[in-house]
Image (cartoon, grey):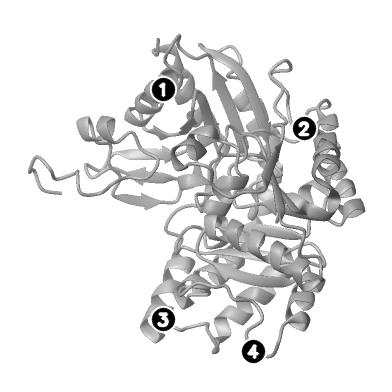
Amino acid sequence: MSNTPDANAAFWMPFTNTRAFRAQPRMLSAARDMHYFTPEGRAVLDGVAGLWCVNAGHCRSSIVDAIQRQAAEADFLPSFQVGHPLAFELAERLAELMPRPLDRIFFTNSGSESVDTALKIALAYHRARGDGGRTRLIGRERGYHGVGFGGVSVGGIGANRRPYGPLLPGVDHLRSTHDPEHPFVRGQPRFGQDRAEDLERLIALHGADTVAAVIVEPLAGSTGVLVPPLGYLERLREICTRHGVLLIFDEVITAFGRLGAPTAAARFGVTPDLICMAKGLTNAAAPMGAVAVRRDIHDTIVEAAAPGIELFHGYTYSAHPLACAAGLATLDLYAREDLFGRAKALEPIWEEAVHGLRRARHVIDIRNLGLVAGIELASRDGAPGARAMDVFRRAFDAGVLIRITGDIVALSPPLIISEDQIGELCGQLAAALEVTD
């Protein structure tokens, strides 16, 4: 990077306080296993798996080698009207990990694209059944479903919605499951399952024959780690089934071991109709997402279509060969090192460590499940988010990368984290809290 005054101005950074960054840039230039490295060579422990995505740790040689081999053999292979073997192999492997009967896989390039794809498939399915009046989509307050217009519309984070006007019509929202009256819960709360009844009320309000799909994160991550109450997801499933509404799980964060299982659906024992995924699919070594679809939904759309293209949807880079190579190598690595089982085994150790922050300065709540934790801080008067931002900067400068959302610190390390590194992560966070006003 040059030393000119505008050297760091050309890149308009995503979800970033640009003015603060330009005033004091914090840069990363390399990564290996559990650590990032600054351009000066200083190690930074990765407490958030990149952005919830590097589940197997950084620069794993088997994934790197697979991408390099594929790049030398074929840099790009289209998926419109022609195919390539890796796409079909990866789809089969993913279908084996998904709950039955979600064994039809549509490839995208990101979680945002996966969400918009799932919403479009839901609408197309009802239309193919002759039930085209089902156009309403229901999300949830504080839900995050990416940055496409569909995902922002069903999402429920105000700052992500307000700058863009009315968004998609015909969208409604369930209440968030978060209950600040019951802080410091370990695992799933035993209260709050009654909030699933919001769905019954919305269906009664709008009419079941108008509702196409409900989309929720089984565990809400980006909004600050909101764990579903016991029985809540099960009740959503029952209501959707009774009224013919499709249930979509946004598992962009929770799939591929984050909760100690291949999917949150498996962890909670609740099978949706579609699952959105991305992030851990390729260990973030190449951009890729996917939607797993119930077989009969796929078959209904295909069989109802006139001769020719059945679903007018897709992306230039759907099933990109480098991403497919990365995905296959990543799934092999997960299986070879039993990383999903490792995450499950580490969960009680992780829980004890993060709840050890209960008496740290400014902490007002801690939530956890799997290898995820949300540490909520008291906000400064008139300056929401400022305290957590200061903690982020202090932690980074001390050698630990965390993630913040508002005044909540989110932790979600690679699944290869050691017990000592769990202690280091929580210890450095406690130290940063202690010196933050």
> Could you say which is closer to the camera, residue 228 or residue 64?
228
Element class at badge 3: loop
> What residue is pinned by disc 4?
308
> What residue is pinned by disc 1?
391
Dividing the picture into quadrants, the one containing residue 223 is top right
Q: Residue at x 84, y 36 (%)?
A: 201
Mark toward the viewer: 3 or 2: 3
Measuring from the top left, give residue 397's x and y in whole percent. Answer: 32, 29
Measuring from the top left, give residue 286's x and y in whole percent. Answer: 45, 64
Q: CA distance from mark 1 to mark 2?
A: 27 Å
Element class at badge 1: helix
> What residue is pinned by disc 2?
188
Dividing the picture into quadrants, the one containing residue 347 is top right
Q: Is residue 96 above or below residue 403?
A: below
Q: CA distance from mark 4 to mark 2?
A: 47 Å
Q: CA distance from mark 1 to mark 3?
A: 43 Å
- The answer to whether mark 1 and mark 3 are in CB contact below 8 A is no
Measuring from the top left, give residue 64's x and y in whole percent. Answer: 42, 67
Which amino acid is tagged 4?
Answer: Gly
Side of 337 relative to 95 (left or right)? left
Which amino acid is tagged 1?
Answer: Val
Measuring from the top left, give residue 250's x and y in whole percent. Answer: 66, 51
Which amino acid is tagged 2?
Answer: Gln
